[in-house]
């Protein structure tokens, strides 16, 4: 076995720890093939010949008149499945979708084509796939590099629960977490909570910028195992895992480019520090950064602190209210005066006091499923990188 002779800090930079789950790329066909009408028609026809046509209609509002009108659009969708030789996965697919109204070809890459790969390798492998799937010549594909732009990137935080009991306690915390974040732009919605799936999302009405998704990866993979879509080894990799996924979409990437000057290149967003900073920024709005305590333990910590007696009473009452009614309800009803004026500043100050004591405002109950007493007094913050699973792979 060959050895990699690199200093530790250089080697660390070359290790992909699996922060990025999937990503999507945009290719504007007309810009890419602007120099030749023949080539554009040839590539477009090859994409059509390998695709299924999907027709859709959209409502659009005229900003000046307010009039609503219908837009017809067409998509040419196809998949290219590759057989992989390593044990993790037997097959994986590139997904292609050409949208006629925009002239963009969108390519979605699964995790297996992203992990351990630099931008150069991702694009190189993509060109091979496009050559094999659409029969586009290598000569033509060699000009595509400068026209490939990132249109979506998903950052994942995988936490492996130590027990079923811990999983139930985590769900309690999710239930009382803020019902909306970032000036109420993103709203929480529990979409599924049953024997086969668990799914909670934070998203805006337009759902065009960022989406925070929380789901039971174990249940999702078990369903795929039962459908023979994955093998036992793949399922075991995600056993007892709950996933927190932050999806940065095209409108958000455009905003970041305008605000920070960050080009929509893969390496700019796949870099570990950027991935962790961007993903954690949204999770912290929901789950904060402190460890989670059982509500009676959190009260005990407050009472053992150096706060005044009066402040201890207020902070304990705040913890009890959030635990019972949820964070957002408590915020809306906290210290409301006779004129029904909200005192958000006092609420925020008291939340800060709790956090300064290293107590998370979100606590879990003394019981879990079927009113069984919990054996847990504290849970680590399951959204912090240091508590999440990693997939160490040398970047090529």
Image (tube, helix red, strand yellow):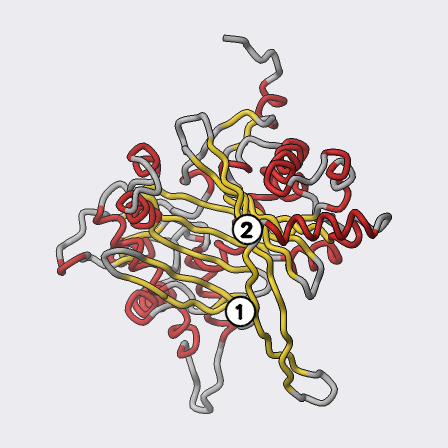
Crowd band around label 1 with a 10 angstrom C-alpha radius: few (<14), some (14–19), many (20+): some
Q: Element type at marker 2?
A: strand
Residue 313 in which image quadrant? bottom left
Out of 279 and 215, give the one closest to the viewer: 215
Q: Element type at marker 1?
A: loop
| Nearer to us: label 1 or label 2 | 2
Residue 71 in which image quadrant? bottom right
Q: Residue furthest right?
A: 35
Residue at coordinates 41% horizontally, 43% vertically from top-left?
Answer: 158
Q: Which mark is residue 78?
A: 2
Q: Position of residue 19 (x, y in %)?
A: 51, 40
Q: CA distance from mark 1 to mark 2?
A: 29 Å
> Which is more N-terminal, label 2 or label 1?
2
What is the quadrant of the C terminus in the image?
top right
Q: Position of residue 156 (x, y in %)?
A: 47, 46
Q: How many marks?
A: 2
Residue 175 in which image quadrant? bottom left
Q: Position of residue 388 (x, y in %)?
A: 41, 40
Residue at coordinates 70% horizontally, 48% vertically from top-left?
Answer: 149
Residue at coordinates 41% horizontally, 52% vertically from top-left?
Answer: 357
Out of 396 and 335, give the one closest to the viewer: 396
The answer to whether residue 381 is left or right of residue 324 is right
Residue where numbered disc 1 is placed? 204
Q: Position of residue 147 (x, y in %)?
A: 75, 46
**In this rendering, is residue 25 above or below 238?**
below
Residue at coordinates 43% horizontally, 67% vertically from top-left?
Answer: 188
């Amino acid at each position: 076995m060959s050895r990699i002779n690199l200093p530790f800090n250089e080697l660390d930079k070359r290790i992909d720890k699996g922060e990025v789950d999937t990503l999507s790329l945009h290719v504007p066909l007309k810009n890419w093939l602007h120099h030749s009408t023949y080539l554009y028609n040839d590539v477009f026809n090859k994409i059509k010949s390998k695709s299924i046509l999907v027709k859709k209609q959209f409502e659009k509002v005229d900003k000046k008149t307010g009039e609503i009108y219908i837009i017809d659009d067409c998509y040419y969708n196809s998949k290219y499945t590759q057989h992989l030789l390593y044990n993790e996965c037997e097959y994986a697919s590139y997904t292609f979708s050409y949208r006629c109204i925009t002239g963009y070809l969108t390519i979605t890459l699964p995790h297996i084509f992203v992990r351990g790969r630099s931008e150069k390798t991702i694009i190189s492998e993509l060109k091979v796939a496009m050559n094999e799937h659409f029969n586009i010549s290598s000569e033509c594909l060699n000009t595509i590099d400068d026209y490939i732009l990132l249109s979506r990137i998903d950052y994942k935080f995988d936490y492996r629960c130590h027990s079923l009991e811990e999983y139930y306690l985590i769900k309690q915390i999710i239930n009382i977490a803020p019902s909306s974040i970032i000036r109420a732009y993103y709203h929480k919605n529990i979409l599924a909570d049953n024997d086969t799936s668990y799914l909670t999302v934070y998203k805006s009405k337009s759902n065009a910028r960022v989406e925070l998704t929380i789901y039971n990866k174990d249940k999702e993979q078990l369903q795929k195992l039962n459908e023979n879509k994955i093998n036992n080894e793949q399922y075991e990799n995600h056993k007892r895992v709950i996933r927190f996924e932050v999806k940065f979409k095209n409108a958000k990437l455009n905003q970041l480019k305008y605000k920070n000057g960050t080009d929509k290149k893969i390496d700019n967003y796949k870099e570990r520090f950027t991935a962790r900073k961007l993903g954690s920024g949204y999770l912290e709005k929901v789950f904060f950064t402190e460890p989670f305590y059982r509500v009676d333990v959190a009260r005990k910590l407050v009472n053992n602190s150096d706060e005044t007696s009066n402040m201890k009473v207020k902070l304990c009452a705040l913890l009890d209210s959030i635990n019972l009614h949820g964070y957002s309800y408590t915020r809306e009803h906290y210290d409301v005066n006779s004129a029904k004026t909200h005192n958000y500043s006092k609420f925020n100050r008291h939340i800060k006091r709790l956090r300064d004591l290293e107590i998370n405002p979100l606590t879990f109950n003394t019981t879990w499923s079927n009113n069984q007493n919990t054996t847990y007094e504290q849970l680590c913050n399951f959204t912090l990188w240091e508590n999440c699973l990693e997939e160490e792979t040398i970047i090529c």
